[in-house]
Amino acid sequence: VPLLLVDILHTENAPVLTMIPTLCVTCGILYVLLLASTISEQCTRVPALVNALSFGEGSEAARQQTVDYISSSAAGFYVFGTRLTTATVLKLMYIWCIVVLGMLARIGTD
């Protein structure tokens, strides 16, 4: 989005075609963030999977310790200390769309 702002602010009356590469890069970054967030969401299901497995008689305590360790490790992707979830990425996409539509409206009125 910062590159898109630079394109719009520094090139007055520039055709929209000059902003296509920046839009493609931004969409690619958002797509990668969405993929990373789905992996983070899948990491929350691992403790239930391990808990459903059977390791033989007398392994319930070890299995429970493993499940507790996996749950407390909170595996997943983190950005600036915040867990990357699908909801976070969707909020980012909504904000990005609002910014882009506002800039396109500004271009349309010029």
Image (cartoon, rainbow, N blue to C red):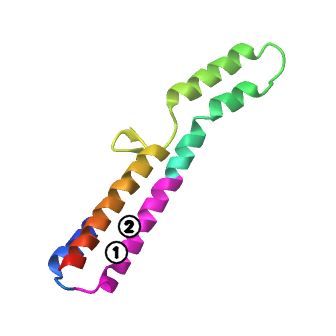
Residue hosting label 2: 26
Q: Is 17 within the magenta?
A: yes
Q: The disc labelled 2 sits on which kind of residue?
A: Thr
Residue placed furthest toward the front = 109
- Report, in whole angstroms, how far the alpha carbon at label 2 lies from the one at label 1: 6 Å
State the SS at label 2.
helix
Query: Range of the magenta residues?
Result: 14-35
- Residue 16: x percent and y percent? 31, 82
- Residue 27: x percent and y percent? 43, 67
Which labelled disc corresponds to residue 95? none
Evaluate if marks 2 and 1 touch, with contact meaning CB atoms under 8 Å apart: yes
**Which image quadrant is residue 25 in?**
bottom left
Q: Between residue 37 and residue 70, name the one nearer to us.
A: 37
State the SS at label 1.
helix
Few, some or many residues within 10 Å of mark 2 (<14, 14–19, 20+):
some
31 lies above or below 106: above
Answer whether residue 1 is visible to the viewer in this image: no
Magenta segment's dominant SS is: helix
Q: Quadrant of the N terminus?
A: bottom left
- Residue at image position (79%, 13%) is 58
- Residue at image position (17%, 80%) is 110
Answer whether residue 109 is visible to the viewer in this image: yes
44 lies above or below 6: above
- Residue 35: x percent and y percent? 53, 55
Residue hosting label 1: 22
Residue placed furthest toward the right = 56
Q: Between residue 42 and residue 15, name the one nearer to us.
A: 15
Q: The disc labelled 1 sits on which kind of residue?
A: Thr
Q: Position of 36 compared to 106: left or right?
A: right
- Residue at image position (50%, 48%) is 37
- Residue 17: x percent and y percent? 34, 85
